[in-house]
Amino acid sequence: MDEIATPRRTKEIIARHGFSFKKSLGQNFLIDQNILHKIVDAANLDENKGALEIGPGIGALTEKLAQAAKKVTAVEIDQRLIPILGEVLEPYPNIYLHHGDVLKTDLPALFQENFSDVDTVSVVANLPYYVTTPILMKLLEEKLPIDNIVVMIQKEVAERMAASPGTKDYGTLSIAVQYYSEPKLVCIVPHTVFIPQPNVESAVIRLKVREKPPVEVISEKHFFEVVHASFAQRRKTIANNLKSRFFTKENKDELEPLLLKAGIEPTRRGETLSIEEYARLSAVLLEAGIGTE
């Protein structure tokens, strides 16, 4: 049987089912075998592992996952694709199709139902650009039994996730992703390997999910509030950003001693602080009763 991810077979499946792309769902189907192999290799699957795919499209990546993993669960939001997937993936009894929005899906229940007999689970996806961050943060924050997440996303977003302190790409997304995982860029993907072609370059990134965060924080909620506040206006110093968020005219003079106590010069900008420095800063502010719930 021909592989799905070729221009000829993709066009044939689309034509036979009268399928039309919905721009609102960010649908771009991959037609390059080489990229598919890189994605599956990065997911580190074997016959004892499971794969959760988000947005299978017409099953190009799904069939590769089914060949590499014990079980695959594919979550597809577009009802029109369910019968197409059922047909093209019929040769693979280890695939379960779930129709729904992954952002509204009870993922712990889905994992319990479908992955109770596998060693570990990898999440693999060609994500629509407009929902990349909400989906990834849901996967990471819900602390699911995931080994790694391998996703095709917009190149600029991938670069922000993997960015180091002091670089222009480093920001709240970098810190959030790196708090929960270790990101590594797998490859850059040109727009020519999709039908239809997106207007931007893509990248495959692998997020190795951490067993525990790289820093200990007293309150994750407070830690992330401090991070978000520090990047509110990138051109401002960390002192000015934190004053705007947590202090009033009456108590703003309390901030500089607290920053120095955390080992941070008040004139620094948010993008120069490491995740360890943000953890220290959050602890010092909490101890002083700043920004407590």
Image: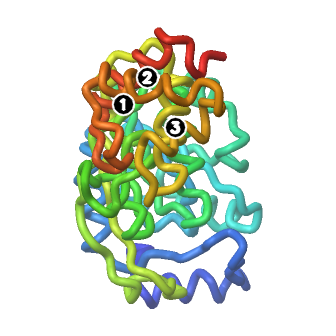
Disc 3 marks which residue? Answer: 242
Q: Residues within 10 Å of mark 1 (few under 14, many from 20)?
A: many
Badge 1 amino acid: Tyr
Badge 2 amino acid: Ser
**Farthest residue toward the top?**
287
**Mark toward the start of the polypeptide (1 vs 3):** 3
* Image height of 255 relative to 128, above or below: above
Q: Residues within 10 Å of mark 2 (few under 14, many from 20)?
A: many
Q: CA distance from mark 2 to mark 1?
A: 6 Å
- Would you say residue 232 is visible in this rendering? yes
Q: Residue at x 29, y 32 (%)?
A: 264
Disc 2 marks which residue? Answer: 282
**Farthest residue toward the right?**
79
**Which image quarter: residue 277?**
top left
Q: CA distance from mark 3 to mark 2?
A: 11 Å
Mark drawn on residue 278: 1
Residue 80 at what x, y percent from top left?
75, 68
